Image (cartoon, rainbow, N blue to C red):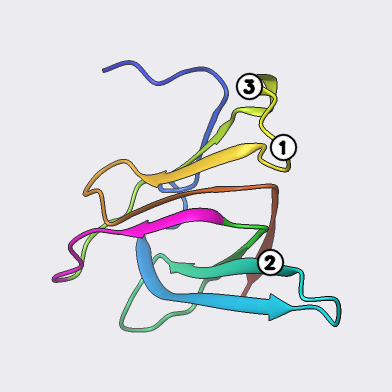
Amino acid sequence: MKKPSNVLQIHSIYGYLHSTTLFLDIGESGDYEYFVTMTLTTDLVNQSKKTIVKFVNVKQFTVGEVNGIWLSQLDIVDISAHQMENINFRVTDGEHGMFSFYCESFTLEELE
């Protein structure tokens, strides 16, 4: 299956999912927003090189079967042209279906 040209694949650099955190932020007025942070690494034993990916305003967070140590194919697809309110990206584990969700934005931070 051919990937769309607007897919950002991180798996070629960072393949192993080291950790995932789902965080709920509730504002004073009762509004809320979910955040997901994923830590990816090239080596699970030494964990010498990591990338932290932070996703903002996460919607429809779904977790599939998580079992074993897998190389994760993190696909981040720009869907901003679909004009969904506060949703610009679809995020999936294209290899094993471990997770999927939508988000407004994301940042990458490389750690040595």
Q: How far is the residue under mark 2 from the one under mark 1?
A: 14 Å
Residue at x-position 67% and y-position 58%: 57
Residue at x-position 35% and y-position 47%: 73
In the image, farthest residue toward the left = 68
Q: In this view, does 95 lie above or below 31?
A: above
Name the kind of residue labelled 1 in the image: Glu
Helix, strand or loop for disc 1: loop
Point out the stretch of residues depicted in magenta.
59-68
Residue at x-position 14% and y-position 71%: 68
Q: Is residue 58 above or below residue 68?
A: above
For residue 52, side relative to residue 46 (left or right): right
Helix, strand or loop for disc 2: strand
For residue 21, side relative to residue 103 (left or right): left
* Residue 106 magenta-highlighted: no
Q: Where is residue 17 in the image (x, y as percent from the top left)?
A: 37, 67
Name the kind of residue labelled 2 in the image: Glu
Mark 1 sits on what residue? 85
Q: In this view, does 93 lie above or below 42?
A: above
Mark 3 sits on what residue? 82
* Residue 60 magenta-highlighted: yes
Q: Where is residue 105 in the image (x, y as percent from the top left)?
A: 71, 49
Between 7 and 29, the one nearer to me in the picture: 29
Circle 3 residues within 10 Å: few <14, some 14–19, many ≥20: few
Between 98 and 85, the one nearer to me in the picture: 85
Q: How far is the residue under mark 3 from the one under mark 2?
A: 21 Å
Residue at x-position 34% and y-position 64%: 16
Quarter of the image with the C terminus is: bottom right
Circle 2 residues within 10 Å: few <14, some 14–19, many ≥20: few
Mark 2 sits on what residue? 33
